[in-house]
Image: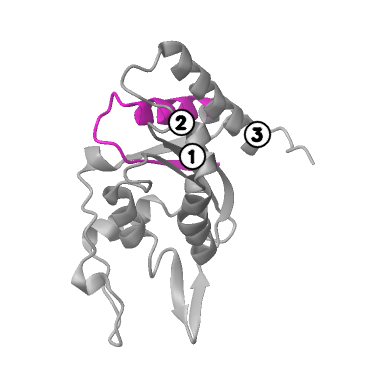
Amino acid sequence: MRHALIIAHPNPKSFTHSVARAYNAAITARGHEAVERDLYAMGFDPCLKREEVPTGRGYQTSPDAAAERARLADIDVFALFYPWWFNAPPAILKGYVDRIFSTGFGYRPTFGGSEPLLTGRKLISFSSSGAPDSWVRETGALNNLIAGFDRHLAGVCGLQFVDHVHLGGVVPDITQESVEDMLAEVRAAVAQAFPQVGVPASV
């Protein structure tokens, strides 16, 4: 399986990047292939262009979006990595979804609705925040995000939603031991979600 690691954090030394690296190592150890898409390093433009918005006269995919869609054409798993900013994904990730997973790649318009174009592929998310896990659970913040972002994206595009692993309590003075415990959660999520190549998935 080919996994697109879509990373949305401007600092390559961030915890978010550490999570992506742990995921990369875990899936490659299981015989899968990783394709990294570091949005800030790429200089990805998240602003939807006027011509990209469908109208009665159609729409036009911008060259940069068309090139990105071509890179993702044979991806089996879309893995998102990002911090929570105001309880939501960073603007660059939302813009990536708006421009890349929209009409012509994620779905196509049909009479009275739309038809998913990514059926059979998968979506998994890894997010982090400074808030403790207890607050994230008690306030319903994680469930709200999963419903409004992960499951909506999956439903519109026909993706199978695999999991959303949220890692809370990521603060500037976090201990290395805590970081390692969280990265172990990432590796465990990979082991749970994706079989070793050549070994049938458990029923």
Q: Is residue 29 above or below residue 192?
A: above
Q: Which residue is disc 1 drawn over?
A: 136
* Tags 2 and 1 touching, CB below 8 Å: yes
Q: Residue at x 54, y 40 (%)?
A: 137
Tag shown at residue 107: none
Q: Amino acid at mark 2?
A: Pro
- Residue neighbourhood size for the residue with mark 1, other residues' Cα within 10 Å, grouped as few (<14), some (14–19), many (≥20): some
Quadrant housing the C terminus: top right
Q: Earlier in the sequence, mark 3 or mark 2?
A: 2
Q: Amino acid at mark 1?
A: Val
Stretch in magenta: 1-26
User: In the depicted view, which residue is nearer to us: 56 or 73?
Assistant: 56
- Residue neighbourhood size for the residue with mark 2, other residues' Cα within 10 Å, grouped as few (<14), some (14–19), many (≥20): some
Distance from disc 2 to disc 1, alpha carbons, whole Å, reads 7 Å
Left or right for 38, reference 124: left
User: In the depicted view, which residue is nearer to us: 138 or 187?
Assistant: 138
